[in-house]
């Protein structure tokens, strides 16, 4: 682990288990952040405007008798893909291991009242970014600072305000309940209104929230979030992962998947909790067989309640306000001849089913086809006629991909050669098509 010495302002390597006491900085990135390479290049770091943020946060840590500080801008060598992958997969645990996290809110003035209904604090950009979710939850203590580094308050002191802004119950903010007690749907809902510059990062920033490790593949776009869900399914039987819905006005391109295309689909699932089902068809969900994935789709056993030509597939979860009377369900249709393969339909709806109806239903092992819906198809950057603009966040985590996509965007050419015989003369002509 690479740390910044808070008085010498030098980067120091600490390996193995001998990690000293350290603080950590949480912030939103500006346009000219100090990088690891800047620290290696003489006094280049000091020439950047953002160096003052590093110097001031180091001073705050030093005043608290903390010798080391971790900052994501300069403590990770982002030009090293192996180090970058390891850092992102380990970052949640680095935040959790910090003595304290300093959250610097550059857009909150020092005279702001965080308890006011329209406070700058509650509207800070810090609460809208994907990466800051783990930075809010993981540390044992978080202290918020305004634009001039005036102390705003601690996470504990501001817990009610933060809960209202983020939708995260206070018990999870303060560690009174372990994160694993929150359902998959609840945790997804906390990220549902957050954004990342790169499509893939909305999945990668949640790895620690779900205790998942997986390789990073920049360029896979929405498939990163599908991979995250697949990895989650390997380690949990929490069926609230299927308790998502799209807005009614969203056009669905793929209409046959049980998995969401982004956390945004869970924005109305914050009250969905994991639970058990009443016995269905003589079987109890307490002894249900595990689900598994194949190239055909997702295989799982669910109670199916017939509704006309479709079915309500009852999940092992419920809105916490209906825990004693109903369970959550999604719509499926049978697309096979033997009743074994289904598609999800009516993506804008989550239904509830009475416990009595579940007891009378058929409990069945089925396969649900496994393509996630997309709200809008996105061309690969290499297919665009013009390279896409480079953003600060593009460079934050994967500078080499930005360069690669720029080169591909201008040079990718597919040449197809085919030969057409001309019967009258027997001559052969070659035709070339460039795409």
Image: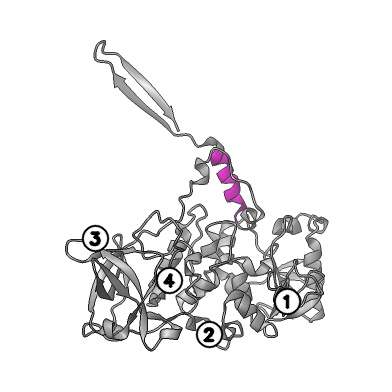
Q: Viewer-proximal residue, 87 or 223?
A: 223
Ranked by sequence position, the earlier of labels 2 and 1 is 1
What residue is shown with label 3?
A: 335
Can you tell which mark lies on residue 232?
4
Number of the front mark, 3 or 1: 3
Which of the marked residues, 4 or 3, is nearer the chain's N terminus? 4
Front-most of 398 and 271?
Answer: 271
Q: Is residue 429 visible?
A: yes
Position of residue 136 measured from the top left corner of the image (x, y, whole percent): 63, 75
In this picture, which residue range is highlighted in magenta?
A: 398-409
Answer few, some or many: residues within 10 Å of disc 3's Cα (few below 14, many 20 plus, some between 14 and 19).
Answer: few
User: Which numbered disc, 2 or 3, marks the residue closer to the eye?
Assistant: 3
List x then y, in percent, for residue 430: 36, 21
Q: Which residue is mark 2?
A: 178
Q: Earlier in the sequence, mark 1 or mark 4?
A: 1
Asked whether the residues under the numbered discs 3 and 1 touch, taking CB atoms below 8 Å apart as contact, a structural biologist would say: no
Return the mark for residue 144: 1
């Amino acid at each position: 682990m690479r740390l910044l010495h808070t008085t010498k302002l030098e980067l120091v390597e600490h390996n193995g288990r001998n990690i000293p006491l350290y603080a950590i900085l949480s912030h939103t990135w500006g346009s000219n952040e100090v990088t690891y390479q800047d620290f290696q290049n003489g006094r280049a770091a000091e020439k950047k405007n953002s160096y003052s943020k590093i110097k001031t946060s180091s001073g705050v840590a030093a005043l608290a008798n903390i010798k080391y500080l971790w900052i994501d801008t300069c403590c990770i060598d982002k030009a090293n893909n192996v180090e970058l992958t390891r850092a992102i997969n380990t970052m949640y645990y680095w935040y959790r291991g910090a003595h304290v996290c300093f959250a610097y809110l550059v857009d909150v003035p020092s005279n702001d009242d965080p308890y006011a209904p329209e406070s700058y604090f509650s509207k800070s950009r810090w609460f809208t970014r994907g990466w800051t979710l783990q930075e809010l939850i993981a540390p044992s203590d978080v202290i918020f600072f305004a634009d001039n580094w005036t102390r705003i308050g601690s996470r504990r002191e501001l817990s009610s305000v933060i809960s209202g802004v983020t939708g995260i119950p206070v018990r999870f903010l303060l560690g009174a309940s372990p994160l694993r007690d929150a359902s998959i749907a609840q945790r997804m809902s906390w990220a549902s209104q957050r954004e990342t510059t790169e499509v893939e990062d909305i999945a990668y920033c949640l790895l620690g929230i779900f205790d998942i490790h997986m390789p990073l593949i920049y360029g896979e776009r929405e498939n990163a979030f599908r991979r995250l869900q697949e990895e989650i399914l390997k380690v949990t039987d929490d069926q609230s992962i299927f308790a998502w819905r799209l807005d009614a006005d969203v056009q669905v391109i793929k209409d046959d998947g049980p998995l969401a295309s982004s956390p945004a689909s869970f924005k109305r699932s914050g009250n969905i909790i994991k639970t058990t089902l009443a016995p269905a068809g003589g079987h109890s969900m307490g002894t249900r067989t595990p689900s598994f994935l194949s190239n055909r789709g997702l295989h799982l056993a669910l109670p199916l309640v017939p509704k006309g030509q479709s079915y309500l597939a009852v999940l092992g979860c419920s809105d916490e306000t209906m825990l004693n009377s109903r369970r959550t369900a999604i719509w499926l249709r049978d697309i096979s001849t033997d009743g074994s393969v289904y598609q999800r339909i009516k993506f804008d709806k989550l239904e509830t089913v009475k416990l009595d109806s579940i007891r009378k239903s058929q409990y069945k092992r089925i396969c649900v086809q496994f393509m996630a819906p997309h709200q809008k198809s996105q061309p690969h950057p290499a297919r665009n006629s013009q390279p896409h603009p480079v953003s600060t966040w593009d460079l934050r985590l994967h500078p080499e991909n930005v360069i690669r996509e720029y080169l591909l965007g201008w040079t990718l050419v597919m040449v197809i050669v085919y030969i057409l015989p001309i019967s009258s003369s027997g001559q052969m002509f070659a035709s070339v098509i460039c795409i």
